[in-house]
Each structure stands twice: as C-alpha cells, then as structure tokens.
C-alpha cells in the first residue's frame, strides 16, 4: 500500500525534498539526497531531478558521468530519464599533468611544444560534445513531441596554461614573462572539421572561463558554432601579455575576427578581455596597440561596435578602447558622409568598463593644475631588490611601467572627451530601444564611495544614461500614476550623467554643444543633464557635488 508521502502530487513532494535539502550543510547536501532516494521509486525520481539539474564535471570523472547518463545498456530507461533532468553542465577539461613544463623549457619558451596539452583538451571537449549530441538525437528519435535534451546552459572552465603553472610552482613572475597564446582547437583540428558535425540545439547560453589559459578567441567562437540555438554568451579570456607587443596585437586581432564568426542567433553577451591594467607609473608612455601606428583605425573597438549592432544586451570589460567603439572616427567630422551609419535596432543595455589609456597608447587624463586643489597619493618607499631574481623582476616591471607607483593624472583631456561625448551621442541617437548605457574608465587611486545611493560606487571617470522608466522597487524617487502602478513601472525623467574625480576647476570641460543637442533631441525637454564632481570640503575632506542642468542640487 503506498504511503501518504507517495500519494502526494509530485510538485508538493519535490518542494518538501528540496526544502529538506536546504536545511543541510553544503557538503552534506548530496549525501542527504542520496539517502532520500532509497525511500521509494517516486522519491528516487524526485531526488534525481534535483541532483542532476546542475552538474559540475571534471574530465577525469567522465567515465562515471557515462555510467550515470550514458545510453549503453540502458534497458530500463533510467539513464534516459536522468538526461532529461539535466539543465546546466559545468565542465573542467583536463590539461593532463604529465605534460608539465621543465625548467629547461622555461628558458626556451619560443620553441616549447604545447602539442600534447592541446591534444588532451581537444579530446576532452570532443568527447563531451559528441556524447551530448548523441543523447539529444536519441531523445528526439524516441520522443513523440521531438523533444531532445533540456540542457540549456553549458560552462567550460579551461585549465591553466602549462607555462603559467610552471612559473607559479617555481615562484617566477607570470606578468613579466612572454607566454604564447594558442587555440584550444589548433588549425589541423579545424581543417579536419572535428566539431563540424556536432550540434547541440538545446543549449542557449555558453560560458567560457579562461582567465589563465591564454587561449585564442577563435576557439571560443568555433565551439559556439556547434550551438545553433545559442542566444547568450559569457566569455572571460586573457589579454595580459605585457612583454611581447606584437603577440598582444595579434590576440586582439584574433578577438576582432572571432566576434564576426559567432552565430547570428547570439543577442546577449558579456565579454571580459582581462588585462594588467594601466601602468602604475603615470609618467610612462604606454605603447600603441594599433597595427599601423597611432593614426590607424582601432580595429578592436570597431569590431565591438559592429558586433553590438545585433545585440539586445552587451557588457564589455576590456583595456585600451577608443571612441571608435561608438562611432566611426574617420567620418565623425562630417557625419553626413557616412555611407552606412551604424544602427542598433534592438540594443537595450550597453555597459562598458575600460581604463584611462586608449588603443593608441594615449592617456585620457592629464596632470592636475597645481594652482587648484587636486587629489594626491603618497607613493610607497621602494626597497632595493634583495636577490638577483628580484632585481631582474624589478627591471622588467620598470620596463612595462609597473614601477614606480607614480599616480598624478586626474584632469580630463578635452580632445579625447570631446570625441567620446560626440561619439556616444551619435550612437545613442541610433539606438531607439536604449534603456541604459554606462561607460566607465577606471583610474587607480579612486575608491568607490559608499556615502549613499546618489554617489554609490564612483571609482573612476564615467558617462551614463538611463531612460525615463524604471522597475518598481528602486530606491530612487519618481512620480506615480494609476496606469504605471498597475504596470509596476516607476516614472523618472531621462538622465545623462558625467562623473569626474576632481573639482570643477580641474575638470574645465563641458560636453560639445552638438552632443548636448543630440541628447535633447532623443530625450525631449524632460532630459536631466547631470555632472558629478569631487570638490574640496571642510577640513581637507573631499565631497561629491551633483549639478543638474547647470545648477547644484546635492552636496555630500
């Protein structure tokens, strides 16, 4: 006779077991659920639907993964049911520890062989993708509704580059060593189409985390082509090369080319291209990352602009960007001559975080005016290197501007900010659905404040825009009416906002009238034009001041 618990509807039983799971310590969750699975077949099915919804998988665990989910010897159909529970899979491909880098290899990195390391990565990825594709095909063939896998989220956490691992083990600097980039999928694999016949139509979001792998962007886009229903990507890759300028330029060119190769179905993206940041020595002249000198087109920023034109939401974290990201700079002096003006028909959210140097190697901030108050930072006393290795590291750090710590730049360069303001305004005029835009330029030495909502998190120089409606629940004040209360929308005026970390005397800049005109045309007479600056207050403290349409409205 079935027990009372077994007679409950599955939804209620699922809720009960899920809440029992929440009462357990994190490490004991899986063991506790495994115990519940032995109560009855119904409990087992519910437990498995919870346990197998989101799986973390190391490549070394792949045989066990096949035992639980594989199609071989599945007469009872239990494994097939488990596959239908799977919604998210996080996979760690192996770099195979036996292919470690010796001390002799580290002294000759230009000729080092990464063949075995690449081969193991390709094998792991190919095995996973082929197995998932086979399961999906099998489910569609046996399901009357032609439903395949329910797997919608796939995350790949790439292993650390073997050279980086070897450097860390031996206590050597990673940042100051030239570490070659490479593709997870080398050219022979691409030419032989190892992944071309693989299709995972259920996956809609792909995440690739490769912070210390030095893999090329083309590998990420190549894997994305296996996902015909892909709509959202989240890529975190590496741009930390400091010693070889041509290598870093090549990595950015690879990035630009790879964006164009991503499936057209992708409409939402979060792209992080990690870097070492702006030089700590602000007397240092950063090198240009443009291919043909400081006057050539910034292909990296242009590729991001072209890619953004088919997005609905885009978040970018990357170093050394330029106004080319928003509008073609070769045509900005006469916009009527642009053959095909950029247009963003669906873009709603655009968030960008960069640094205070451009792709051409120019600082966007100049030295402070000595006659006006300005922020100063005390530089730590430098100690003399205590060993030959430390001395060599110190020399290399000075070569790339990482030492000494000299920070004095805070005055906006009017030429750069004029170009940026006009490029953003032109782009926004071609974004009919834009709801929010944020362009933050991080500057070392400025800490985000926590003095209140009005100035929360200001740790750099930035521009932001928000449209005139905001979801219910915000702390911001606004006007309500009955229709908006029903739709749970808070009515607010559209607003643009510039943030500077210095006072008005140091800023000495206002956005060009053409940019202001474009914003007023887009937003109408309700537009609020805000400028936030950090002025000197009483007792030497520096306080935020907000001006709106030229008049001060808040101080504190």
Image (tube, rainbow, N blue to C red):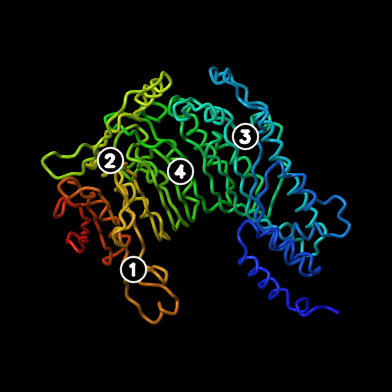
Circle on res. 416: 2
Secondary structure beneath dot 3 equals loop
Circle on res. 304: 4
Q: Residue at x 36, y 63 (%)?
A: 467
Residue at which label 1 appears: 476
Which is nearer the N-term, disc 4 or disc 2? 4
Neighbor class of circle 3 (other Cα within 10 Å; few <14, some 14-19, many 20+) is many
In 3D space, how far apart are the residues under numbered discs 4 and 1 (Cα atoms)? 32 Å
Which is nearer the N-term, disc 1 or disc 3? 3
Q: Nearer the viewer, mark 4 or mark 1?
A: 1
Secondary structure beneath dot 1 equals loop
In 3D space, how far apart are the residues under numbered discs 1 and 2 (Cα atoms)? 32 Å
Could you say which is closer to the camera, residue 240 or residue 478?
A: 240
Q: Nearer the viewer, mark 1 or mark 2?
A: 1
- Callouts 1 and 3 close, C-beta under 8 Å: no
Neighbor class of circle 2 (other Cα within 10 Å; few <14, some 14-19, many 20+) is some
- The picture places residue 476, in percent across and down from the top left corner, at 33, 68
| Quadrant the N terminus occupies | bottom right
Q: Residue at x 35, y 69 (%)?
A: 475
Q: Nearer the viewer, mark 3 or mark 2?
A: 3
Circle on res. 184: 3
In 3D space, how far apart are the residues under numbered discs 4 and 2 (Cα atoms)? 19 Å
């Amino acid at each position: 006779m079935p027990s009372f618990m077994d007679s409950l509807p599955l939804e209620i039983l699922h809720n009960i077991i899920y809440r029992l799971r929440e009462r357990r310590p994190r490490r004991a969750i899986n063991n506790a659920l495994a115990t519940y699975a032995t109560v009855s077949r119904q409990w087992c099915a519910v437990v498995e639907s919870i346990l197998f919804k989101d799986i973390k998988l190391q490549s070394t665990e792949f045989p066990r993964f096949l035992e639980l989910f594989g199609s071989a010897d599945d007469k009872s159909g239990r494994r097939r049911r488990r596959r239908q529970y799977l919604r998210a899979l996080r996979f760690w491909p192996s770099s195979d520890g036996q292919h470690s880098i010796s001390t002799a290899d580290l002294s000759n990195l230009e000729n080092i062989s990464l063949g075995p390391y690449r081969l193991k990565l390709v094998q792991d990825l190919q095995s996973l993708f082929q197995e998932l594709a086979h399961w999906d095909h099998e489910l569609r063939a046996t399901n009357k509704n032609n439903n395949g896998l329910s797997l919608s989220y796939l995350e790949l956490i790439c292993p650390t580059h073997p050279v980086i691992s070897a450097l860390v083990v031996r206590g050597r600097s990673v940042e100051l060593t030239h570490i070659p980039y490479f593709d997870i999928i080398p050219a022979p694999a691409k030419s032989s189409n190892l992944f071309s016949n693989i299709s995972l139509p259920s996956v809609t979001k792909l995440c690739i985390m490769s912070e210390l792998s030095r893999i090329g962007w083309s590998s990420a886009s190549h894997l994305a082509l296996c996902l015909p229903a892909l709509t959202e990507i989240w890529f975190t890759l590496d741009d930390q090369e400091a010693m070889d300028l041509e290598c870093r330029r090549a990595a950015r060119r690879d990035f630009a080319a790879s964006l164009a190769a991503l499936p057209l179905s992708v409409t939402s993206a979060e792209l992080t291209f990690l870097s070492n940041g702006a030089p700590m020595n602000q007397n240092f002249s950063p090198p240009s990352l443009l291919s043909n000198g400081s006057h050539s087109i910034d292909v990296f920023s242009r590729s991001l602009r072209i890619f953004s034109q088919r997005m609905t939401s885009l978040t970018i974290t990357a170093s050394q960007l330029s106004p080319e990201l928003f509008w073609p700079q070769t045509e900005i002096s006469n916009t009527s001559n642009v053959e095909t003006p950029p247009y963003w028909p669906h873009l709603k959210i655009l968030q960008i975080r960069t640094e205070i140097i451009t792709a051409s190697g120019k600082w966007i901030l100049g030295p402070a005016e000595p006659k006006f108050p300005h922020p100063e930072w005390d530089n730590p006393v430098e100690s003399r290197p205590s060993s030959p290795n430390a001395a060599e590291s110190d020399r290399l750090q000075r070569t790339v501007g990482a030492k000494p710590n000299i920070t004095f730049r805070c005055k906006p360069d009017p030429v750069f900010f004029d170009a940026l303001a006009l490029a953003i305004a032109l782009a926004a005029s071609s974004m009919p659905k834009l709801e929010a835009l944020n362009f933050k330029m991080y500057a070392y030495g400025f800490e985000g404040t926590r003095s209140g909502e009005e100035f929360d998190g200001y740790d750099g120089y930035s521009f932001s825009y928000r449209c005139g409606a905001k979801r219910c629940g915000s702390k911001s004040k606004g006007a309500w009416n009955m229709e908006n209360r029903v739709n749970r929308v808070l009515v607010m005026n559209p607003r643009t906002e510039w943030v500077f970390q210095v006072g008005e005397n140091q800023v000495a800049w206002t956005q060009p009238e053409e940019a202001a005109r474009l914003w007023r045309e887009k937003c109408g007479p309700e537009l609020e034009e805000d400028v936030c600056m950090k002025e000197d207050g009483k007792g030497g403290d520096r306080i935020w001041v907000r001006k709106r349409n030229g008049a001060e409205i808040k101080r504190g």
